[in-house]
Amino acid sequence: MIFPASPGRRAALLLSLVLMLAACATPTAPPPPPARPRLLVLFVVDGLPVRQVTGLRDQFGPDGFARFLDGGADFTQAHYGYAFTVTCAGHATLLTGAYPHRSGIIGNEWVDLASGKPTYCAADPAEHYIGQPTEPLDGTSPRKLMAESVGDVLRRVDPRSKVIAISGKDRGAIMPAGHAGTAYMYMGGSGRFVSSSYYMQRHPDWVEAFNAARHADRWFHTQWQPLLPEAAYARSVPDRQPWFGPKGGELPMMLGAAGDSAPGPDYYAALLASPFADTLTLDFARAAIVGEGLGTDDVPDILAISLSGHDYVNHRWSAESRMSQDHLLRLDRLLQDFFADLDRTVGRDHYVAVLTADHGFTPAPELSRERGLDAGRINGSQLLAAVNGALAQRFGAPRLVTTASASALVLDRAQIAARALDFDAVADAARTALLAQPGIASAYTRRELASGSRAGAPLFDMMRNTWHPEVSGDVQYVQKPKWMFGTTAATHGSPYEDDTHVPLLLWGPAWVRPGQREAPVQMSDLAPTVAALLGVATPSLSEGKPLPISPP
C-alpha cells in the first residue's frame, strides 16, 4: 500500500530534487569576450598639444572630445620618445609602433647621403597623383617607410580588411595607410582628394562623385566667424600680434581674395589654415565609409583620418592664438557630428575610436619672452656659417659641413677624404662649434649615436631614437627649450614637453574601460594596443607595449 506523503515531506522531496538537478547541471559559462570591433577609427589632430585639450575642456560640446574625456580612456602622460617631433615621423609612429631609428622616417624631408640631394619622406619618382600634376618631391608612396603597420598585418591575415587613410597632407595619409592600405590626400591646388598610382590606376566611382561635387568651393568668399562670444577668448592672446608675420591675422576672416571671381589655387590652399579643410576631410571620410562599406561586417577595417588644419593654424598664429582656440572648438563640434554619423551608419557598439596628435607645439618665442622665459629664434643659415667658420679655422678647409638635414649636420665626406682628415675629429669639432651657438642645447656625433656610448647623457636617448644610421646626418642636435628654428609664428620639432606631450584618447564601450590613466606611456604603445584590439600580431618593428584599456 502506498500512503500519500505529508505536505512537509512533499516539500522536502521537491527541494532534494531541485538540488540534485542543480548539481548535475553544467556550470554557467562566463559571457564571451566582445568580438573584434568592425571598424577602428584613428583621428590624428595634426599639431595638437595636450595643454590645449586640458585648457579648453570647459568649452567643448557634450559629445566631441567629451566622448573620450568623459566616457573613454584618457592617457594623461602620453609622450613621443624621440627628439625631432614633426608630422611625418609622428604619423609613421602611430600604427607601426616604431620610432624614427627603426622606421627610417627621420623627418618630413632630409638630404640623401649618397647623392646630396633633398628628398621627402613620402616622395617616390616611380609614382604619380591620379588626375593631378605631380612634382618631383610630392608624396606619392610609403616606400621610404621601413616598418610595417598594423594595417599591413591586418591585411596580410585577411585581405578582405580595408585600410583607408585620409588627410589634408600627403604624408598624413600615406604613413598611417602603411604599405598595404590606401591613402587619399587633399590637393591644395584644386580642392580635390586624390590617391596615387602606388595604390591604384583610377579612382573608385565614389571618389570621382565626391570630387565632381566640388565640395571645397562652398566656403568661397565666406567668413570664418568666431564660434563663441568675445569674452570666451580671453584665455588666448589677442589678434594682430606682430609675430604673426606680414599677413597678420584676426577673426572674422574671409576665405578667398575679394578680387577673385571664382575659387582657385590660392583659395584652395588657404582652406588648410581654417576649420573648413577639416570639415572637408571629414565629409570625404563619410563618403569613404559608405563607398567602401567600412565597418559593415565582422572583418575589421581601419579608417585613419588626419585632420591637418590645426597644424597650419598653429604655425601661422600659434597654439596660444584666438584662431587656434576657435579652430579647436569648431573641430570639437565637427567630431560630435561625425560621431553621430558613425553611431548611425556603423553602430555605436561596433567601432573603436582613437584620438591623438602627431606632435605638439612650442609657443612663439616672443610670447615666451613676454612671460619671462629664455626663448629665441635660430637662423639655420647663420648657424651653418658659424660652424663652418670654426671648422675652417681648425682644419684649414672651407665648408666641411654641406647642409643641415632633419636636425643634423651633414659632413662633406669627399672633402674630408681628399684632405686626409679624420672624420670623427671633424665631427667632434662640429659638435663643439654647435654647442657654442646661442639656442643649442645638445649635440652628438654619428660615432656616439651608433655606439650608444653616451647613453643617459642629456637628451641622448631621445636623440638616438630620432637618428637612423642609413639616412640621418653626422652630428644630431637639438635646441634649448622655447627656442625654435624658422620664421613662422610658432613651430615644433623639439624633445620637450611642448612638442612631445599629446592627447591619447580611446573610446569603445565594449573594449575600453573609461577613466584617466596617469602613468607615463609612450606613443609607440598605440600600435600594439590597436593590434590587440583587432586580434592580430604586433607589427614586427614595434617597440611599444599594449596600453591598459580593457574592461575589468
Image (cartoon, rainbow, N blue to C red):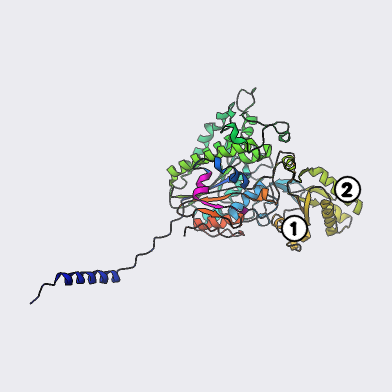
List x then y, in percent, for residue 392: 90, 50
List x then y, in percent, for residue 30: 39, 63
- Residue 378's tag is none
The answer for how far apart the CA atoms under marks 1 and 2 are is 26 Å
Of marks 1 and 2, the one in the foreground: 1
Dot 2 amino acid type: Gly
Q: Nearer the viewer, residue 464 or 30?
A: 30
SS class, disc 2 = helix
Q: Nearer the viewer, residue 505 or 182?
A: 505
Residue 256 shows up from this direction: yes
Pointer 1: what residue? 458
Dot 1 amino acid type: Pro
Count of all numbered marks drawn on residues in the image: 2
Q: In the image as oriented, which residue stretches furthest toward the left?
A: 1
Residue 284 shows up from this direction: no
Q: Nearer the viewer, residue 513 or 359?
A: 513
Pointer 2: what residue? 389
Residue 75 forms part of the magenta stretch: yes
Residue 151 forms part of the magenta stretch: no
Classify residue 134 by image quadrant: top right
List x then y, in percent, for residue 353: 51, 49
The magenta region covers: 65-78
Within-10-Å neighbours for mark 1: few <14, some 14–19, many 20+: few
Residue that appears at 79% across and 57% down? 445
SS class, disc 1 = loop
Q: Is residue 450 left or right of residue 3?
A: right
Q: Is residue 387 left or right of residue 506?
A: right
- Point out the tag, 1 or 2, that comes first from the N-terminus: 2
